[in-house]
Image (tube, rainbow, N blue to C red):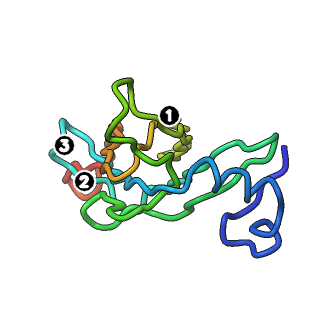
Amino acid sequence: MNSVNINDENFKNTEMYKDFIKDNPGEGRLLIRAFAANEAIPIANLRVTVSLDIDSTKVIFFEGYTDNSGMIPRLFLPAPIYNTNNLVEPLFTTYDIFATYNNNDLIYKVNIYDNICVVQNINVVPEINERKGNIYGS
């Protein structure tokens, strides 16, 4: 499967992208929180990728690392417009979250809604090491 970054200008000029944005003109927000030990230990520098498959192309919307608080706070992602007059379930777009921690792959799917902040927790089990008599998570 081919992959492309959402910021690639060549990709933004394709019909595939234009069709996707036509179906997803709204914007939802994603907050990623990475923790261990029941949210007691934030996991900093966790590598995270947020992507979506569009017509057999993996479109990467975000690639980066969690901050010292174990968070990626402001990801804005395309989503279908929320219709307030609609009495059925709101439309959403499902994104893939891929994280790597100590050579373990963590994969999540998250639904993004227009004008809604969705929180995705990534719970990891830290590898315990002993160094100079102290025990710490790595």
Q: Residue placed at 64% from the left, 56% from the top?
A: 21
Q: CA distance from mark 1 to mark 2?
A: 21 Å
Return the x and y of residue 129 as percentages of the image width and height: 33, 46
Return the x and y of residue 109 as percentages of the image width and height: 50, 34
Q: Is residue 124 left or right of residue 56?
A: left
Q: CA distance from mark 3 to mark 2?
A: 7 Å
Q: Is residue 72 left or right of residue 59?
A: left
**Among the two numbered marks 1 and 3 on one chain, the one whose residue lies closer to the N terminus:** 3
Read off the residue under disc 2.
42
Give the number of the mark in front: 1 or 2: 1
Q: Is residue 51 left or right of residue 77?
A: right
**Kind of element beneath mark 2:** strand
Front residue (pair 116, 5)? 116
Check residue 39 in the rendering and tell me which mark sits there, or answer none: 3
Residues at circles 3 and 2 in contact by the CB criterion of under 8 Å: no
**Kind of element beneath mark 1:** strand
Label 1 sits on what residue type?
A: Lys
Return the x and y of residue 100 as percentages of the image width and height: 52, 47
**Residue density around tag 1, few if under 14, some if 14–19, many if 20 or more, within 10 Å:** some
Front residue (pair 106, 62)? 62
Measured along the vertical axis of the image, is residue 53 above or below residue 71? Answer: above
**Among the two numbered marks 1 and 2 on one chain, the one whose residue lies closer to the N terminus:** 2
Front residue (pair 68, 22)? 22
Give the number of the mark in front: 1 or 3: 1
Check residue 109 in the rendering and tell me which mark sits there, or answer none: 1
Front residue (pair 101, 137)? 101
Q: Residue furthest left?
A: 40
Return the x and y of residue 105 as percentages of the image width and height: 55, 38
Q: CA distance from mark 1 to mark 3?
A: 20 Å
**Residue density around tag 3, few if under 14, some if 14–19, many if 20 or more, within 10 Å:** some
Label 2 sits on what residue type?
A: Pro
